[in-house]
Image (cartoon, rainbow, N blue to C red):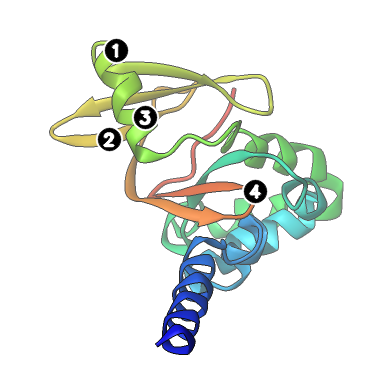
Amino acid sequence: MKKLLLILTITLSVAFSQNTIAQGTIVDVAVGNEDFSTLVTALKAAGLVGALQAEGPFTVFAPTNAAFAKIDSKTLNSLLEEKNQKALSNILTYHVVSGKLTATDVVAALKKGNGIVELKALNGQVLTVMQKDDKIWLKDSNDNYSEITATDVMGSNGVIHVINTVVMPK
């Protein structure tokens, strides 16, 4: 009986610990999801992979490939060129906030802020999170909107929230 109890305890301990371990950094999570292949390419071109593999924590509003497809292909290809690394870095760091903000945190902040919360992105500019039509949206510096379509994709150094449009800084 003691042996059975010990085996059960060890099995539950292993199962519990595996469920609480994140699947790598937020970069690793993005690399492992084909819907973020354009984002990963952009992160590499901007030289930001190492920064986003750091301890963090970070909250990343990650545009999907479909979100990047909304940008004119000539413009997107130009941004991926080495000479435009600074501009691309500015755009990508506009999608990242210091700290780990889960969906629950965002909803609580929206309630406290009467449906609007301003977040300072890593590039120093403000992203506005708002609730509208029973959905959560990001509003960028140019008054364009991006819907948050999925939340709480966890990494060991932060969280990813999926968005359907690339937000653009000033």
- Measure the alpha-carbon separation of dots 4 and 1: 26 Å
Among numbered discs 1 and 3, the one appearing first in the sequence:
3
Q: Quadrant of the C terminus?
A: top right
Residue bearing mark 2:
136
Labelled disc at residue 112: 1
- Pick the residue in front: 132 or 29: 29
View extreme (top): residue: 113
Among numbered discs 1 and 2, the one appearing first in the sequence:
1
- Measure the alpha-carbon separation of dots 3 and 2: 9 Å
Q: Is residue 55 above or below residue 141?
A: below
Q: Classify mark 1: residues with Cα within 10 Å, few (<14), some (14-19) or many (20+).
A: few
From the image, state whether disc 4 or disc 2 is nearer to you: 4
Q: Estimate the x, y position of residue 133 in percent, counting from the top left.
A: 13, 32
Please tell me which residue is depicted at 67% across the width and 20% down the height of the picture. 124
Q: Estimate the x, y position of residue 77 in percent, counting from the top left.
A: 67, 59
Among numbered discs 3 and 2, the one appearing first in the sequence:
3
Q: Classify mark 3: residues with Cα within 10 Å, few (<14), some (14-19) or many (20+).
A: some
Please tell me which residue is depicted at 39% across the width and 22% down the height of the picture. 143
Residue bearing mark 3:
106
Among numbered discs 4 and 2, the one appearing first in the sequence:
2
Q: Classify mark 2: residues with Cα within 10 Å, few (<14), some (14-19) or many (20+).
A: many
Residue bearing mark 4:
157
From the image, state whether disc 1 or disc 2 is nearer to you: 1
User: Is there CB contact under 8 Å for labels 3 and 2?
Assistant: yes
